[in-house]
Image (spheres, rainbow, N blue to C red):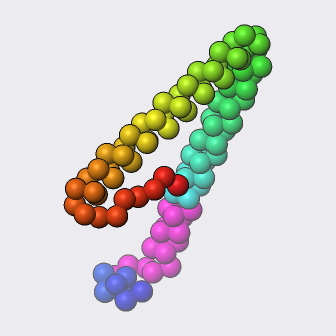
Amino acid sequence: KKKCEKKGLDFEKEEAAYQKALAEKKAAQEAKKQAAEAKKQAALKAKEEKEAALSEEQKAALAAKAEAKAKKREKMQAAALEEFNKIRRKNNQPVLEKE
């Protein structure tokens, strides 16, 4: 209020303009958030429809691929833990166990 008086501005008018701009900004953020959520839901629905259209053989192949990917990830994590423990042993620190 004092800044407005100092600059010769009407505080009420400036405050109203600020609140209007703030409300527009919040509305735009909300619209963007809703659009992102709608896009996410549409992608999820499309994925479910695509999976439903697959044959049993294709579903089994996807499951096998996912299982192989999980095993590979687990193997890589074990190798990283082993490398980390190797460094810890070298520095005379206690070895970490897999959780």
Q: Is residue 35 visible?
A: no
Q: Residue at x 72, y 10 (%)?
A: 57
**Where is 42 relative to 13, above or below?**
above
Quadrant of the rendered image containing residue 42? top right
Query: Is residue 22 shown in magenta?
Result: yes
Q: Which residues are magenta?
A: 8-23
**Where is 78 relative to 63, above or below?**
below
Quadrant of the rendered image containing residue 91? bottom left
Q: Residue at x 26, y 53 (%)?
A: 87
* x, y percent for residue 62: 64, 19
Q: Residue at x 46, y 35 (%)?
A: 75
Q: Is residue 12 left or right of residue 30?
A: left
* x, y percent for residue 63: 66, 23
Q: Nearer the viewer, residue 10 or 50?
A: 50
* x, y percent for residue 44: 68, 32
Q: Is residue 38 left or right of residue 71?
A: right
Quadrant showing the N terminus: bottom left
